[in-house]
Image: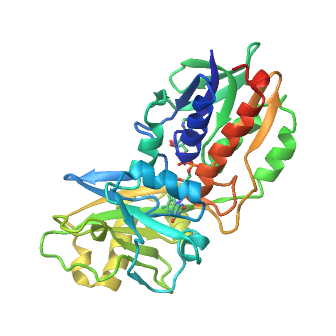
Amino acid sequence: MHDVIVIGAGVAGLECARGLSKAGADVLVVDRADKPGGRCATRSFGGQPADYGPLFIHGRDVRFIAAVEQAAEGDCLPDWPLRRLGRGSPCQPDAYAPNEKRMALRGGINAFPRALAAGLPLKLNTQIVSIARTRGGMSVSSATGERLEGRNLVLAMALEQTMPFVAALEDAEGRDGILALLRLFISLPCLTVIAGYPRGAPVPDFDIQYPEEDHALMLLCNESSKRPGSPQVVMTYQAAPRWSRERMEMPKDQWARELVAAAARRLGSWADSPEWTHAHRWRYSRLDRANELAGPLEMRVGDSRVGIAGDLFSPGGGIQAAWLSGGKLAERLSQEPSKLDL
Ligand SMILES: Cc1cc2nc3c(=O)[nH]c(=O)nc-3n(C[C@H](O)[C@H](O)[C@H](O)COP(=O)(O)OP(=O)(O)OC[C@H]3O[C@@H](n4cnc5c(N)ncnc54)[C@H](O)[C@@H]3O)c2cc1C
């Protein structure tokens, strides 16, 4: 029986688990993926990292920026992206607001959650399919039938992944109100392709391009520009929400080909023939514009407490909001030690 089980090892769940651990709780973080980080995703190709979720970190909360800089240990590329082309929309409306700090991580954005996860008990490759109240607290069951027990529970997944678990807590105080509130918000899909080009391919003269009138592409990112001297040109192409939604259930090869062709129309014919590609389907990439709540939510279920954190639960959305909401939830849950039974 753990004090708290955190479902979701993204930035929100990890920061929450860190706060709870510091307060003396016995915490277990569970995630269905084989590594922590959630949407802060990086993949390595021949030793060269490439980001395919968020492409850089931005924020203005000094504690958040300090946490990223500390986690990245000199790996930060401050002010990236410097060379921005086009007047299309960035992923997060605030990304280029005045006073917003921006940085890329040379080792890839996943270095941030990886650092947050250091020293935390993680149970990976464990997809949670149901949660239920038990006599002593809460039980959490995995797709393989394993049962984990916790006195308290934190849900730290994408909004749409969180809602079925909230709905399952029939005797949770305030459940219907919370569900009604959560149903007001929506996450956007994003189809993404990472493309590697042969040596000698032209190097684009931008870090990020946001096309204005392109129904397919939301952005083109020159990943190699984060890593001067990288052996090959690597690009990440991210599709616009509507285009992504229309193709979400189509075979990956089909939309990946279309997205590369759309990029080639902007970059030149060389971009139409990558040496390799990796396509990823983000069903829930980020929240729609201006979707945000002021803080994390909490429900009582018998003697247990169930907290909800994530990018929805702090102003501004995105990674900063995920981190802030996780920290705030940990603070709140630790404020009443008797209830947490620490
Ligand atoms: C393409 C893309 C572009 C983005 N651009 C930006 C940007 O420019 N700026 C910005 O700030 N943010 C951006 N974001 C959003 C940002 O990545 C997220 O807001 C943030 O990472 C969310 O963190 P989180 O911890 O709330 O959720 P997540 O990172 O989604 O973590 C949730 C975790 O829960 C796990 N999980 C889900 N269901 C289960 C289950 N049933 N059982 C066990 N584990 C489960 C998942 O595997 C995941 O690891 C972007 C995201 C994407 C995908």
Q: Position of residue 143 (x, y in %)?
A: 53, 27
Quarter of the image with the C terminus is: top right
Residue 97 against residue 13 in the figure, above or below: below
**Relative to 227, 130 lies left or right:** right
**Relative to 125, 44 lies left or right:** left
Quarter of the image with the N terminus is: top right
Residue in the foreground of this view, choosing between 55 and 131: 55
**Relative to 187, 200 lies left or right:** left
**Relative to 52, 89 lies left or right:** right
Residue 258 against residue 88 in the figure, above or below: above
Q: In the displayed image of the protein, which residue is found farthest to the left? A: 200
Residue in the foreground of this view, choosing between 182 and 203: 203
Residue in the foreground of this view, choosing between 160 and 55: 55
- Residue at 63 percent of width and 44 percent of height: 326
- Residue at 32 percent of width and 59 percent of height: 106
Q: Position of residue 67 (x, y in %)?
A: 50, 51
- Residue at 51 percent of width and 69 percent of height: 101
What is the number of callouts on the image?
A: 0
Residue in the foreground of this view, choosing between 177 and 217: 177
- Residue 171, by quadrant, is top right
- Residue 236, by quadrant, is bottom left
Residue 237 against residue 303 in the figure, above or below: below
Let me know if residue 304 appears in the view. Answer: yes
- Residue at 34 percent of width and 56 percent of height: 74
Q: Position of residue 299 (x, y in %)?
A: 80, 35
Let me know if residue 284 appears in the view. Answer: no
Q: What sort of colour scheme is used for the picture?
A: rainbow
Q: Position of residue 94 (x, y in %)?
A: 60, 71
- Residue 195, by quadrant, is bottom left
